[in-house]
Image (tube, rainbow, N blue to C red):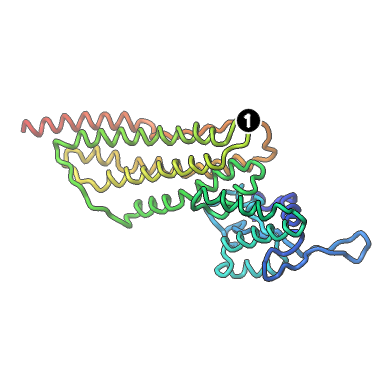
Amino acid sequence: MANEDRFKQIVVTTIAKRAANRCSNPDCRAITSGPGVAPMATVNVGEAAHIYGANLGSARYAPDMTSANRSAITNAIWLCGNCHKLVDDDEQRFPAGLLFEWQREHERVIAEHVGKAGAELRRRYEDRHLEEFGKLSYLAERIILEKGSLWEYRLTSEVLRFEMAPIARRWGALKRGLYVKPSQRIGKEDFYPWIQARLHEVRAIVNACNGLMNDEFARAWGASGVPGSDRDIVDSCRLYAGVCQSIISWEEDIRFTSVHHIFRNLQDHFTGVAGVLLEEALKVPEFLSDTLSQEGLTGTHTLSLTLSLPDGWGDEAERLMEKSVADFAADLEG
């Protein structure tokens, strides 16, 4: 197990206390700590289990999950040793979503038993609050409800991971030629306005991504010392994912368009550039995770994220457009 993906001792201690040192499996609920033989000794048979596995090959491992979220308390559930082995030996029967449900329900039961009269009211509030967001991952829901240390950044990382996973799969399929779309044909007279529009669009996509990363995310995270807004964070992440989806749509438009042979060099230059942008955009959750994983992260920090077209790509596009116009004029004269 990678050291950075282990639970720190404070996480283990806290998740045990939140579970009242009882197994969170609703069919077990075994007490996991008690007296040892010596007067000052105690025995513990409970374990802080990873809901999403801590390392490659472990149960419920999610390769696109960030290290910071993998080792956070929001990915932990308190189980007795027997139940920990049970859920890890049969991940098909015990998927991550089920374990999140166990953890949440167990803490609700414990809250009611320790005399929190408002536990049922809080439960109603939490349910209503989560309804505002629509579909989220279980981990994102838990981060929203518990709001631990650096929760704004961990929520951003997790929502981006969840929202962009299908986009990454779609891009992988497009790269491997696993699907096609009906081809459109652009006539010689219509090509220049068409390619100019595509150039304008790709630049607008870059500007939108940078605006979201450096303005909207920062606003949603809140000013220094001020809690962020979970609603704004989720909205900004979904806008970002929407822009990434438009990158794929742009690439499809380029790839599945038939043009006159005079313009094919220019079309080839445009083909694939969206993929370069998308693969950089997909690194944002990992970037946040790496930042959060730094030891002793304290104080005020500014995150600057910039997405850009490859060096010289725009200049080469302009040069090829000028050449295409000249070739088109020569073709007309011929």
Front residue (pair 102, 198): 102
Quarter placement of the N terminus:
bottom right
Quadrant in which residue 88 is drawn: bottom right
Left or right: 117, with 178 as reference point: right
The residue where tag 1 is placed is 224
Which element type, helix, strand or loop, lies under badge 1?
Answer: loop
- Is residue 268 shown above or below 169? above
Q: Which residue is rendered at x = 28% and y = 37% of the image?
A: 198
Q: Name the amino acid, label 1.
A: Ser
Q: Residue furthest left?
A: 334
Left or right: 97, with 121 as reference point: left
- Is residue 216 shown above or below 143? above
On the image, the x and y values in percent for residue 8 come to: 71, 50
Front residue (pair 11, 278): 11
Left or right: 46, with 179 as reference point: right
Q: Which residue is rendered at x = 67% and y = 71% of the image?
A: 27
Front residue (pair 308, 79): 79
Numbered circles on residues, count: 1
On the image, the x and y values in percent for residue 160 come to: 50, 46
Q: Which residue is rendered at x = 59% and y = 70% of the image?
A: 90
On the image, the x and y values in percent for residue 157 come to: 54, 45
Quarter placement of the C terminus:
top left
Left or right: 148, with 249 as reference point: right
On the image, the x and y values in percent for residue 32 come to: 77, 64
User: Around disc 1, counting alpha carbons within 10 Å, would you say few (fewer than 14), some (14 to 19), or many (20 or more)?
Assistant: few
